[in-house]
Image (cartoon, coloured by chain):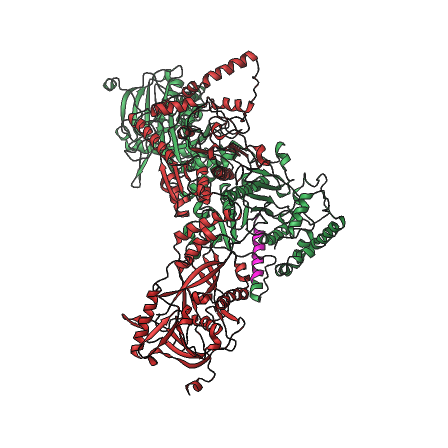
Chain colours: A red, B green
Amino acid sequence: MLLGSCGNLKLQFAPFSSSLEAGFWHQLTQKKLSDYRLDESPKCIKGYYYNGDPDSLPTRLTLEFSAFDADGPTPARCCPAPGTLYNTNTLDAFKATDKKALLEKEAKEIWDAIQSGAALKKPSILSKFILLTFADLKKYHFYYWFCFPALCFPEGIKIIRPPVNLENVFSAVQIAALQEAYDGLCIKRRTTVAPYFIMKYTEDTVDLALLEDWETFFTDTKKVTVGVYDPCTLSQHPGWPLRNLLVLLAKQWGSKLDLVEVLCFRDRTLQGSRSIHHSLIFQIKLPELSMCPKSVGWEKNPKGAMGPRMVNLSECMDPKRLAESSVDLNLKLMRWRLVPSLELEKVVNTKCLLLGAGTLGCNVARTLMGWGVRHITFVDNAKISYSNPVRQPLYEFEDCLGGGKSKATAAVDRLTKIFPGVNAQGYNMSIPMPGHPVDFSQATLSQAQKDVQQLEKLISDHDVVFLLMDTRESRWLPTVIAASKRKLVMNAALGFDTFVVMRHGLKKPMTGSGTHVPGSSLFSNIPGHKLGCYFCNDVVAPGDSTRDRTLDQQCTVSRPGLAMIAGALAVELMISILQHSEGGYAVASSSDDRMNEPPTSLGLVPHQIRGFLSRFDNVLPASLAFDKCTACSPIVLDHYEKEGFIFLSKVFNSSHSFLEDLTGLTLLHQETQAAEKTDGETQGSENPDQSTSRCELYTYPY
Amino acid sequence: MLLGSCGNLKLQFAPFSSSLEAGFWHQLTQKKLSDYRLDESPKCIKGYYYNGDPDSLPTRLTLEFSAFDADGPTPARCCPAPGTLYNTNTLDAFKATDKKALLEKEAKEIWDAIQSGAALKKPSILSKFILLTFADLKKYHFYYWFCFPALCFPEGIKIIRPPVNLENVFSAVQIAALQEAYDGLCIKRRTTVAPYFIMKYTEDTVDLALLEDWETFFTDTKKVTVGVYDPCTLSQHPGWPLRNLLVLLAKQWGSKLDLVEVLCFRDRTLQGSRSIHHSLIFQIKLPELSMCPKSVGWEKNPKGAMGPRMVNLSECMDPKRLAESSVDLNLKLMRWRLVPSLELEKVVNTKCLLLGAGTLGCNVARTLMGWGVRHITFVDNAKISYSNPVRQPLYEFEDCLGGGKSKATAAVDRLTKIFPGVNAQGYNMSIPMPGHPVDFSQATLSQAQKDVQQLEKLISDHDVVFLLMDTRESRWLPTVIAASKRKLVMNAALGFDTFVVMRHGLKKPMTGSGTHVPGSSLFSNIPGHKLGCYFCNDVVAPGDSTRDRTLDQQCTVSRPGLAMIAGALAVELMISILQHSEGGYAVASSSDDRMNEPPTSLGLVPHQIRGFLSRFDNVLPASLAFDKCTACSPIVLDHYEKEGFIFLSKVFNSSHSFLEDLTGLTLLHQETQAAEKTDGETQGSENPDQSTSRCELYTYPY
């Protein structure tokens, strides 16, 4: 009768609903950025499901933070499900993915595991899933589509005895025995769940085993009972994990099985009391199966249609973390796509000291931010004036009010507003200068000493020092200190429509002046330690330094685009140098090297870039350090290192003749004059450019 | 007795106190910016003083807004004083000015006017002053020092009868008669004041005349009475204006004068009632004078020491006006100092339309602001994402929250924060693109039509159109519209470390294809109207366009400094073109022109700047418009102009073959392929570069 009452009732299964935690997307983002990058190959991931949900909850497969650790732990009493992640690089690829093929491929694998018997030993293979994703990491939009492949009996599965609650069939003793047997099985397998099991029972005993023990466990297979850890909460239907199990049974033992009794094991704790009474039990007749059956499994979207889902996490992810990973993304894209050898860590971890927070300083800071440099320190003693914001891109009109904010601190505030993850600091301080006496009083003298100490400490604490001031003389002290401390110095200076961007020569760790490197002539192949500094060379871009600087000495008059170009180039040159294995010691590239194989993945590492905006042209001169340089020559460094502030204060308090006498420039000048008088004409020189610049050197006021 | 009682009492004068209104500094700022510029030559200005102040006020000489209108009106009842402004260009020049020499020069002029008698006709010369200034227009600090030159009797002036109030000497009748006579004199002279006058009186009459009438007025000069419009309020001392008058008297009539009676005419209205009773009257004996006496007159500072004063007006001037004039100052300095022929008005008044407000758009806008361009309009349909602020310098972290602000409007907000005087607008709209169908529905079609109309209007309303998008196809429509409307197009596009910045060819007002200009070959001397557009040429910087653009199509991966350089160059190129007398029609400069005389005061006007950051190099190619160009060829423009949106919608809705068929590219392609097959090798070409780029042209997706 019972049999008859079922008629042609077919067993129906509650499909999985995917449940994705924000943590999963967070972790996918990280994986994408750090590991997967542009790799679209399938990845093993892991979800889990639970058989203790209260009624009315859907049959969920959950993926969270831990999903990427396929071999890691699963929450207690949850059943892990292995999955395959297909993460595409574009939305188009996501859409164009052949879902049917993907499903068939996965279903074939399940079928193969069933045929081979591998699924008996590792039944979790029966609950495999597919996750197809596209992560738009600019907008934090995540597109995804789950598939829970299920092999289907062509004509369905005939219900012999429809599902009822276990307590309708089992006695309390049996239920208790089942519970005890299940726990025993788990303990024996050192787990908290058994996704599938086989079962024998009498009126007061219950015996459980794993699928792999089938042959020894069942002596009579006319009627077998199988158990499934069932995530479904519906009272008339089993959940999805049963489907492939039944296919397995049909394939393995189908012809032998008259009747299969199924226990949908549900195990919940309500108000502190555990219950398995609501588990379902029913009986079915399995059809025969020979060839691989068809499969289904792509999840419907919330509208009930076949289609992907999208989740927009731009708002619920922590904005500051979002900003950080977004900034990282852009940088990593460069490496992934274009320059695989790019050593981003060298860039990101470089501590940059910016002396000057004006037009150049602002543009340099912005370019550094673009490169992901996190540690940026400003030194400036000026306040923001009304003419600044249109040319100094870290300031706004409001910063000018009330006498103007200090540039150094306002620049820090702005960087933090641009990117909260930045580590920026500002020092509103003066840099003592040659020829600008500090000995008016004990107070000014000790202030100058403090300023020198502060500057020395700052230069020690940073990796690269940018000279971005608007006067020549303020560059002297940091040039000397940085040369002494062997810090890479990037220097930028503007004329009206010309600029110079250069790296200072980086002295060898020991000031050994005798360490000549063979093969370096005056102008080619000059290694980094023999390159000149700003004071070894011509100073401001040619043709401008001699012009009228009236009305306001502090006001640099240049074509507005110039500072952006020079600031950007100063940073890009630094980046290229950082990518060179020898860093600041790298041989200087020259204009002639433009046609040669570049020394770094990013290109050339010139000594100087001299730009001419009126011709839209750059040249790349290189020049040797000058042994009479007023800043980086051995005699100056020697005095600085031995006498410290005593020497420096002499420089500050003296006219320029002090340094010229010290370095021998005075003598050179006298000799040159004498020679000119004798010759009656300008003395010929192998190196007219440099002699010109050196003449200019000591005619400049400092 | 009376005589004796005075003993050796010498006459003492109350010096002028300078009183400078903020309006004076405002006007000086304007004059400096518009007229004086770097001109330090002396300028005529005008102050005034008043003889009606209440007691206890100092003897003030006031300069206000009107001071620069030397011939303009003076406030009623105030006496004008002519002055000479020495405005220096630097603080150093201000300090270094030889004050003694300046005073002596001015005193000499007064003395000469006294000797010659010119001072009789024009006695205001006796109250001349000097104002030495330095205006720090970045900080709005004004340094100044007044001098009121007074010639001095070596031994002073002996008082015969000390000063007393007029009412102690004159009867009420006499006072009334004096007042009436004074008013009559003024009316006769059509003024409200008489700085100096001569006077005769009886017990009931008072007779006044001007100095120039001395000889006819005084018949007996044993004792004369002179009047002076006296700004002093002290009861025992006359004000400064009397000093040079007495020198004049001594020089002109000294030997004839036994006794001089002085009326310090003071004329105030208290509680509605006019009074001259408090005028002073006293008698003196003038010494003889032969040679030019010594002079004094530099004002003491508030501390009572000889020294200049400084006023800081940065806070009390209207900040927005301050910002505007500060921004102007920087620009004008360029003209004053370096490029006198720079036509700033052409720049400042150029209306710029920026299509794209991303990395390029932000940098272009900032450079335009630096150049003083006030009219900037953005078009963009994107929202600000977290990766933007470090590379797009108009946005900050906060702009990314809540899904991100619209770039177009956020960019406007930022420009206004940078410079409140800007006239910026933003349009959050899409630009329809070829191959991106718009005919899904009537709604999308009419939206596309609206977008086209809006874009057409925007392009009409602006002078220069910047193409700063991150896709090739979005540049097509504005290229077509701008070509049709003969608007100058500046185009910038980025690769990873290469960029192209170019101006599109500017078609002649009539689309006459037969107007060949002689002397232009394929690659040199190409006039502006024959230059190619973005679509006539190779597209993205070489070597990058073919690379992988996965992960996020919108994310332009480039070295961070690149957009700053390209954005700056796009603006600088525009500025140079604007300075050319032919503007967008100017013949394109090439790399070879770098050694020639530049065609504008700012330098070259190339067609394209192609930059290679890895080599720190730029080249300046120029190329002809392509008669099969998919954007600017006559056939495309013709269809657009005749069919309008109907033609455009065909382009939007069709594959690229539509435009290729229309322009003849398809045929060209077929012929090329056929020729290659026939030849069995790549066909030779006079112009390999261009044929390559044209092959690339129609393999690009758009």
x, y percentage for residue B422? 47, 46
Judged from this view, the residue extending furthest toward the bottom is A1
Q: In which quarter of the image is residue A551?
A: top left
Judged from this view, the residue extending furthest toward the right is B678
x, y percentage for residue A330? 48, 49
x, y percentage for residue B544? 57, 47
- State which quarter of the image contains the N terminus of chain A: bottom left
Query: Does residue B365 show up?
Result: yes
- State which quarter of the image contains the C terminus of chain A: top left
Q: Is residue A513 left or right of residue A176?
A: right
Judged from this view, the residue extending furthest toward the top is A678
Query: Does residue B373 show up?
Result: no
Q: Nearer the viewer, residue A84 or A290?
A: A290
Q: Quadrant of residue B615?
A: top right
Vertical position of residue B313 compared to residue B454: above or below? above
Q: Nearer the viewer, residue B148 or B51?
A: B148
Q: Which of A357 and A501 is in front in this view?
A: A501
Q: Is residue B605 left or right of residue B27?
A: right
**Residue B454 is inside the magenta segment:** yes
Vertical position of residue B92 compared to residue A363: above or below? above
Vertical position of residue A229 compared to residue B40: above or below? below
Q: How many labels does the image show?
A: 0
**Residue A623 is inside the magenta segment:** no
Which residues, given as a range, are shown in magenta? B447-467
For the stretch drawn in magenta, the main secondary structure is helix
Q: Nearer the viewer, residue A10 or B6?
A: A10
x, y percentage for residue B650? 64, 60
